Image: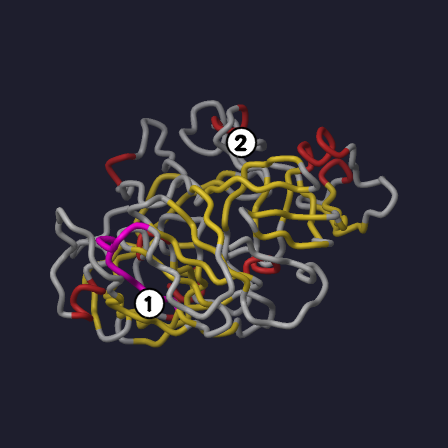
Amino acid sequence: MRMRNGGLILVVILAGLASPAAAADCGPLKQIASLDLKAAPGGGPRFGVPVTINGSPRLLLLNTQYKESRLTRAAVNALQLKPAAYGKMLRLDGQVTNGYMVTVDLGIGTSLLKGTEMLVDENVGGGFDGEFSTDLMQRYDIELDFTGRKLNYFLSDHCEGKVVYWPTTGFTTVPIRGWGARLTNTASMNSTGMTPHPVEFGITVSIDGHEIPASVETNLAQTTLNSDTAHSLFGLTADSPGTVQLGSLDGTQAHRRFGYVFKTLTIGGITLHDPHIAMAPDLLGTKSSEMIQADSHIQRRSDDRLPTLRIGMDVLRNLHMFIATGEQKLYLTLAPQPPGPGRGGAAPTP
């Protein structure tokens, strides 16, 4: 997707600063913008970012999974925008649908990005008007403070390891994958008109001692494990003792979702006890005749790049995170909140 005006130049405009320059010596941490996070209108653990679209106030779901920011079909219709064709899009239920995009003036904070292109999504749920995705974040270091309800931007030219400035008894770090990758654009669609799926914001975690590739998804309410992985590593199926039925992705018995309480979920030096995790099959592209041709998740179903655990806000709300883009590291501390289901007993390693 093309982001005219240089993508997140807005933070430079906000702060009145120049773009980060290559420097021989590192410097102190420099915050250049701070955005509020608002609770989901429909309830739940997810957060939204207030913006304006062509001058109209809107709330976009904070989304660290998708690379392209989006507007819902309802918002597009209410704003009387004119969508243009944009290849095809994959749905979680396995279907492939026609994709569309719109061009808008996007206001974030006190900045205005004119001519910004956004994809059109049918519905993101939760009362949101669209999604505030990584195309608006990945060029800078990002702090996600869910307790303080802040999305903070920093330059990446600071000294390595000098990012945890908030009060804490200790922190942990984990290497990250897929953050800060070059933005996609309409020219990158392949011959079938399929838009390449963005690379997930990936890390490695462990569940009950088993290492598992994972994606960090603030757009997801409940942490979800691929059901094939749940069966191969833990012998779990929808009919196993201790599971809770959660419905089906497409209404069939073969694709049931189910929940299970594991013993531990470990991210770096932080361990969360008794995490409640949902299991679901990966159906992306499985119901389309174009699945073999698509340059997207479908081709990646058989390789190691597709994360098998999607970490949602039921887990992430327990953490205070700093994404160090230049270092390709994720800094984590426990958020200040009382123990509860899926979070009690967690302890960071200094």
Residue at the image position 38 percent from the left and 53 percent from the top? 323
Q: Residue 201: x and y, percent?
A: 43, 45
Q: Residue 55: x and y, percent?
A: 27, 75
Residue at the image position 74 percent from the left and 48 percent from the top? 263
Viewer-side residue, 222 vs 257? 222
Q: Residue 307: x and y, percent?
A: 53, 37
Determine whether the residue tagged by mark 2 lies in a helix, strand or loop: loop
Q: Residues within 10 Å of mark 1 (few under 14, many from 20)?
A: few
The magenta span reads 151-160
- Residue 75: in magenta span: no
Taking 139 as reference, is 232 left or right?
right
Q: Residue 299: x and y, percent?
A: 47, 26
Determine whether the residue tagged by mark 1 lies in a helix, strand or loop: loop
Q: Which residue is mark 1?
A: 80
Taking 172 as reference, is 225 left or right?
right
Q: Give the amino acid at mark 1.
A: Gln
Residue at the image position 41 percent from the left and 69 percent from the top? 166
Q: Give the amino acid at mark 2.
A: Ser
Mark 1 and 2 residues: CB-CB less than 8 Å, in contact? no
The circle drawn on residue 288 is 2
**Quarter occupied by residue 348:** bottom right
